[in-house]
Image (cartoon, rainbow, N blue to C red):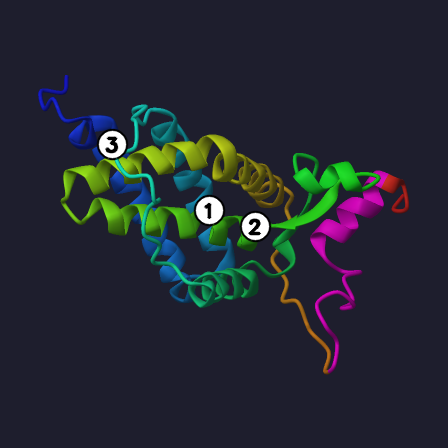
């Protein structure tokens, strides 16, 4: 039972901080791990982070100008590129819960690395604000984190969990995505990707 009357120091917030810190630590040091190891780590961390985020208190913000941001576009790209390389052919998946679905005829192609980079951006900004030790700043960090969880990264987390589960128990092995010289991301050959094979399975192209 919490005895501290300040909700920013409540057990639910402190436990969420711990999980968010673990997530950021692994994302930042993904180069030290193999892709399949990283996927299995995410398989364990993501459900816990979702649970702890759902228990964050509902607070009202102190400031009207919004919270300070620390993670830059370059930081986001570094995390995305690192995880994209690690996850290789396991990275891309079909997503049906995407705002772009309204403008397409079916599921859209998403990626675990982009989801993780988006979540990392929110988690890192939250942690750096929370670690200031200033009550009002910490309060607004918790408020924004819960709001973004409900409206943004919570769904991305669940999307990636489904894709990670599917790949881990598929019996597939992560393959390296080879990019030919002069070939951009939109035109690269994806015939051998896990997700491409799954698309062909769904279309009945593979008997």
Say few, some or many: other residues with alpha carbon within 10 Å of mark 3 (under 14 / 14 to 19 / 20 or more).
Answer: some
* Residue stretch rendered in magenta on the structure: 182-202
Q: Nearer the viewer, residue 49 or 200?
A: 49
- When the figure is inspected, residue 133 is found, relative to residue 180, above or below; the finding is above
Q: Residue at x 28, y 37 (%)?
A: 140
Residue underneath mark 2: 112
Point out the tag, 1 or 3, that comes first from the N-terminus: 3
Q: Residue at x 77, y 52 (%)?
A: 196
Q: Which mark is residue 40?
A: 1
Q: Is residue 65 magenta?
A: no
Q: Secondary structure at mark 3?
A: helix
**Left or right: 168, with 47 as reference point:** right
Query: Residue 147, position in %: x, y?
Result: 42, 32
Does residue 170 appear to the left or right of 39 in the view shown?
right
Residue 47 in view, yes or no: no
**Residue occupied by mark 3:** 13
**Where's the N terminus, which quadrant?**
top left
- The answer for how far apart the CA atoms under marks 1 and 3 are is 25 Å
In the image, residue 159 lies at what x, y percent?
A: 58, 38
């Amino acid at each position: 039972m919490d005895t501290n009357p300040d909700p920013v120091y409540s057990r639910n917030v402190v436990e969420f901080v711990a999980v968010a810190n673990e997530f950021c630590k692994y994302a930042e040091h993904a180069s030290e791990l193999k892709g399949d190891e990283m996927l299995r780590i995410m398989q364990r961390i993501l459900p816990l982070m979702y649970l702890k985020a759902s228990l964050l208190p509902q607070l009202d913000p102190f400031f009207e100008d919004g919270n300070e941001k620390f993670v830059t576009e370059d930081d986001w790209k570094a995390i995305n590129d690192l995880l994209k390389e690690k996850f290789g052919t396991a990275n891309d998946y079909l997503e049906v819960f995407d705002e772009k679905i309204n403008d397409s005829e079916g599921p859209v192609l998403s990626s675990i690395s982009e989801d993780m980079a988006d979540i990392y951006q929110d988690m890192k900004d939250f942690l750096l604000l929370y670690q200031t030790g200033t009550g009002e700043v910490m309060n607004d960090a918790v408020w924004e984190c819960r709001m973004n969880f409900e409206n943004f990264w919570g769904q991305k987390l669940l999307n990636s969990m489904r894709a990670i589960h599917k790949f881990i128990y598929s019996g597939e092995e992560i393959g390296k995505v080879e990019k030919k010289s002069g070939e951009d991301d939109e035109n690269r050959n994806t015939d051998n990707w896990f997700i491409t094979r799954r698309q062909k399975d769904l279309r009945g192209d593979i008997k």
